Image: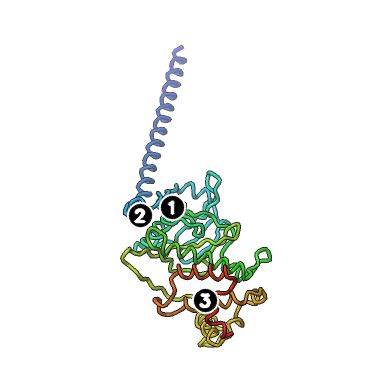
Amino acid sequence: MNENVLVKKLMRSVLAGSVGALLLLIAAWRSYKLIKKRNDVKRRQKFFKKNGGFLLQQQLSSTHGRVEKTKLFDSKELEKATDHYHENRILGQGGQGTVYKGMLSDGRIVAVKKSTIVDEGKVDQFINEVVILSQINHKNVVKLLGCCLETEVPLLVYEFISNGTLFEHIHDPSEDFPLSWETRFRIAIEIAGALSYLHCAASIPIYHRDIKSTNILLDDKYKTKVADFGTSKSLNIDQTHFTTLVQGQKPICFTRSEESRSLATYFIQSMEENRILEILDPRIRKDGQREEMIAVAHLGKRCLHLNGKERPTMREVAIELEGIKMSQGVSTTEQNYQEEF
């Protein structure tokens, strides 16, 4: 009998000890989760500050309601959307970061730009892109959906543009989407219209400063979307001029003579020698739009003037391109130079 009592007491002690140990484990687990949560909050706050979060808040508040509120995405949602940034989701890579294709929890397909790790001196460039894109609402400009600043590197979330870049279609042509003269002309008109809007109709004049074929996207209907505003600049109301350098698509070609290696120089030289039709892409020579091509070429020559003040404004370019289209090649520019050809 005494032995049974002893066993029962021992069992009670073991049970009490087990319960105590379990409670201790639960308390330790809760403490661990609490500390982890606090550290996670501190870590996210650290990244938020490092990635220019406070600067973004300041910039957006200074717009006095001129822009829509930028959505701040959760880092875990974007990790899930991009399959933890799997290499199979990569849409493109460049000097400013890598772009991934992702699907949000609501089913929307997006492009997530994961910026390269930059020093604090370049954070302004990232915040600049966020603020500028927040001010833009145009059918031919890629739409910014939001950003995430609570990760090691800042993230931008854009609408997904499905049909790649203009560069890809120029240099790797597809039978499904041949780049005819009509198509190229339409793309040029859409780009000019978008830039004219940015320069003249946006709440603050915006200058892209990096227009090139790799930054021109095509959507599911092959409509133009101007992208990548990382080097853009907003002008104050009292600023009247902002000059950028003349750039060319495939700007340097070593197969041409030394004096003609620059595409812009080669183009101008060909214009002056009255052989512009000879340097055109063979795929569009047979399109039969000779007058339009000549008119657009002369407009392009004016746009390449080394003195920025001598170039037409983008509003003038957009209006003239529309005029050339409506008149089917009969424009003032073409008429002035018709005798040269």
The residues bearing labels 2 and 1 have C-alpha atoms spaced at a distance of: 11 Å
Mark 3 is on which residue type? Thr
Q: Residue at x 41, y 66 (%)?
A: 207
Cα gap from disc 2 to disc 3, whole angstroms: 46 Å
- Res 313 → quadrant: bottom left
Helix, strand or loop at disc 3? helix
Mark 3 lies on residue: 332
Q: Name the residue that disc number 2 marks.
A: 56
**Quarter of the figure that contains the C terminus:** bottom right
Q: Nearer the viewer, residue 83 or 92?
A: 92
**2 or 3: mark nearer the eye:** 3
Give the number of callouts: 3
Q: CA distance from mark 1 to mark 3?
A: 46 Å
Is the residue marked by circle 1 packed among few (<14), some (14-19), or many (20+) residues within 10 Å? Answer: many
- Label 2 vs 1, first from the N-terminus: 2
Q: Secondary structure at mark 1?
A: strand
Sequence-wise first label, 1 or 3: 1
The tag on residue 147 is 1
- Callout 2 touching callout 1 (CB < 8 Å): yes
Asked whether, in this view, residue 154 is left or right of residue 57, the answer is right
Relative to residue 40, is residue 9 depicted above or below? Answer: above
| Position in image of residue 200 (x %, y %) | 41, 63
